[in-house]
């Protein structure tokens, strides 16, 4: 009682994990959405915002994806999020449950779980461990600072239209290898810490979002990527006890499973 809005951030969100255990992603990203939608319908929720990802569009071979473009997910994580998206929209179309769907580009910032690309590379570099860069490292990602993402969602709570989809991007397209170089340079670590490893299965080459629809309402990102990434690096330097605790236990087991067969000298890199 007393709840009028649901913003559904709940998700399994790491592509690598979805490749080895897709069922968990189906349970959370699709069945979990269904549970929340049913509860929202039952209790008359006034606004339901489904948080999604640019990965539902698949690879952007040229240009940038608009909200009206077809969904073409290429890994279990993206497919589970696309399923959640369409289920949420179906509750608008069928029951007129007031739904908004957002699709954001790659997030970065403080407190991000160290399995993700940027915090993994920062923390590995701080530990003088190799940085496992998939393939040639020329995959392109559009980065948005988590603060900008949250401000966009807050903006849409009052300005977004029911039944609408909104792309949320930072306008910061960068090759993964260039992001890795920036991190190492910030930490004054040698670029030789980068080790190119076997590419991930179903690895999308490029993500890019056209955010004109959202920006036409008056929102735009504020944080320049290099400034935000520099601040993020500093946060991980100053909060080592936070991420060291996480990188023990279950995370280490995951890391061994994910990378031990990829590194040329695996044993020395996963201890």
Image (spheres, helix red, strand yellow):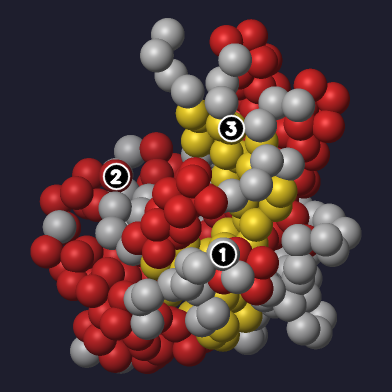
The C terminus is located in which quarter? bottom left
Question: What SS does tag 2 mark?
Answer: helix
Q: Residues within 10 Å of mark 2 (few under 14, many from 20)?
A: some
Mark 2 = which residue? 246
Give the residue at x 57% y 70%.
215
Which callout, 2 or 3, points at the residue further toward the start of the chain? 3
Horizontal relation, residue 90 to residue 169: left or right: right
Mark 3 = which residue? 48
Between the C-alphas of marks 2 and 3, the distance is 31 Å
Between the C-alphas of marks 3 and 1, the distance is 19 Å
Residue 51 screen position, x and y as percent: 57, 45
Mark 1 = which residue? 217
State yes or no: discs 2 and 3 in contact (Cβ < 8 Å).
no
Horizontal relation, residue 241 to residue 21: left or right: left
Residue 203 screen position, x and y as percent: 72, 66
Which callout, 2 or 1, points at the residue further toward the start of the chain? 1
Which callout, 3 or 1, points at the residue further toward the start of the chain? 3
Along the line of sight, the residue nearer the viewer: 265 or 251: 251
């Amino acid at each position: 009682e007393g709840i009028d809005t649901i913003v559904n951030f709940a998700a399994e969100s790491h592509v690598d994990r979805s490749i080895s255990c897709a069922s968990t992603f189906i349970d959370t990203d699709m069945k979990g959405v269904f549970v929340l939608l049913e509860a929202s319908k039952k209790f008359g929720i006034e606004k339901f915002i489904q948080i999604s990802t640019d990965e539902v569009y698949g690879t952007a071979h040229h240009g940038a994806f608009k909200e009206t473009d077809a969904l073409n997910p290429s890994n279990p994580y993206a497919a589970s999020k696309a399923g959640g998206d369409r289920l949420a929209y179906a509750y608008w179309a069928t029951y007129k449950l007031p739904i908004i769907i957002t699709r954001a580009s790659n997030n970065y910032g403080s407190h991000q779980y160290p399995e993700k690309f940027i915090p993994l590379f920062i923390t590995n570099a701080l530990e003088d461990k190799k940085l496992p860069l998939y393939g040639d490292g020329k995959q392109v990602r559009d980065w948005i600072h988590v603060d900008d993402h949250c401000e966009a969602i807050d903006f849409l709570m009052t300005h977004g239209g029911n039944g609408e989809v909104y792309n949320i991007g930072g306008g910061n397209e960068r090759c993964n290898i260039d992001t890795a170089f920036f991190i190492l340079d910030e930490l004054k670590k040698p670029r030789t810490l980068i080790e190119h490893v076997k590419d991930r299965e179903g690895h999308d080459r490029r993500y890019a979002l056209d955010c004109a629809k959202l920006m036409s309402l008056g929102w735009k990102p504020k944080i320049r990527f290099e400034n935000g990434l520099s601040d993020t690096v500093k946060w991980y330097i100053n909060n080592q006890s936070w991420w060291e605790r996480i990188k023990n236990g279950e995370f280490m087991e995951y890391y061994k499973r994910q990378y031990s067969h990829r590194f040329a000298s695996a044993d020395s890199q996963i201890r």
